[in-house]
Amino acid sequence: MAQTQEGVYRRKDSRFWWITTMLPNGKRIRQSAGTKNRKDAEALLAKIRLEAFREYHFDIKPQRTWQEAVVRYLAVKASLKSYRDVQRICRMLDPYLGKLTLNQVNGDMIWYVVQQRLKQGNSPATVNRYLALIRNLLKTARDEWQWIDSIPKIRLLPGEVERDRWLTKDEADRLIQAAPEHLAALIRFALATGCRAREITGLEWSRVDLNRCTAWLNHTKNGTPRGVPLNKDAITVLQGQIGKHQQYCFTYRGNPIRWDLTNTAWVNAIKKAGIEDFRFHDLRHTWASWHRQAGTSCDELKDLGGWKSRNMVDRYAKFATENLAFAASRIESTRDSKVIPMSRFGHVTNSGKTAESVKP
């Protein structure tokens, strides 16, 4: 390409005006202005030059918009398993924040978003998902991209009720019996290993060693591969899947399972089993609850489930009290009491007078 002079120019292969200039930091930019109007292209060039000048000479960062940040944020999060949820939340926030710059996303605007979502019937848990994304995006824009210097303090709403839904052994048996064959296998494996839905449907035979009773997961929620010990129940399930598919362990009619497991077959199965308010992911909660009831320690459960911290595991601590049993027995009525027979207040005498009022 021949040397192009500073300013705006046309290219034969584009219907838009193009701009080119050398910025104060020595960086050359050459890009489409995205417009057929020459004056608009010149205005864009002037804006770029002004922002570059202010940033270089006065350390004044250019104003970045919320939408610019969302585009980059989605590109960063594209590999996440929960990418669709991130997209959905960004779309929901666009009517409130879409026309703002990042510096305009302040405490008042956060309060406004919270109040509007609560008025529309969203639960504190749902609103907290929105707040968490706003906070993470702003922190990324400040700490990694250096687009802004400060962000508002964003606190999650109190009153979020932690989901505590799990099945009894009898309910689990009813669900397995009510489910079609392919779904029953998935349920049994989830109850035996605590694996998430996508970890199960993506499990390949090349990552399973039945002799060593181990499976290796390379597609996990937190992105960290981990090994899963297979108990006898899990081994039995996998043995029943041998020969159905060359690559994947769990299939439906000879094809890998690519869809969300909470589908029509799932809904019909829980309805037939007489179970309400239960999702496939709750099988993982069931597995963890059963482990704690059986005496598995929180540290063991953390490693079995692939959690990175104890925070998520401590929610199941209430299901096991063996470590406190001896302590609770210390004041049993059948034991020799070692409780000192003291008054409720040490400074009160038998006559009801305070120690200070009793003269020697």
Image: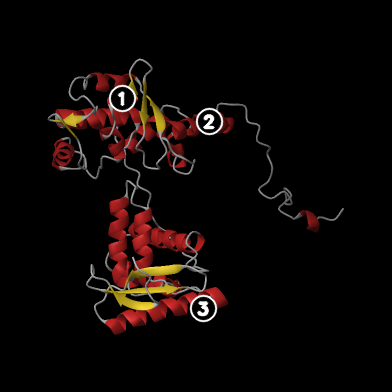
Can the viewer see residue 292? yes
Q: Secondary structure at mark 1?
A: helix
Q: Nearer the viewer, residue 150 or 232?
A: 150
Residue 290 percent coordinates (x, y)? 37, 31
**Tag 2 residue:** 323
> In terms of secondary structure, where does tag 3 sit?
helix
- Marks 3 and 1, Cα distance to the nearest angstrom? 57 Å
Q: Quadrant of residue 174?
A: top left
- Alpha-carbon neighbours of circle 1 within 10 Å: few (<14), some, or many (≥20)? few
Expressed as whole percent of the image width and height from the top left, the position of residue 190 reads 29, 31
Q: Nearer the viewer, mark 2 or mark 3?
A: 3
| The one of 311 and 101 positioned closer to us in this rendering | 101
Residue contact between numbered discs 2 and 3, judged by CB atoms under 8 Å: no
Rendered residue at 31%/35% (across/down): 199
Report the residue marked by disc 3: 54
Q: Residues within 10 Å of mark 2 (few under 14, many from 20)?
A: few
Amino acid under label 1? Ser
What amino acid does circle 3 point to? Arg
Task: Report the residue at 36% width, 23% height from top.
Answer: 230
Which residue position is annotated with label 1?
A: 206
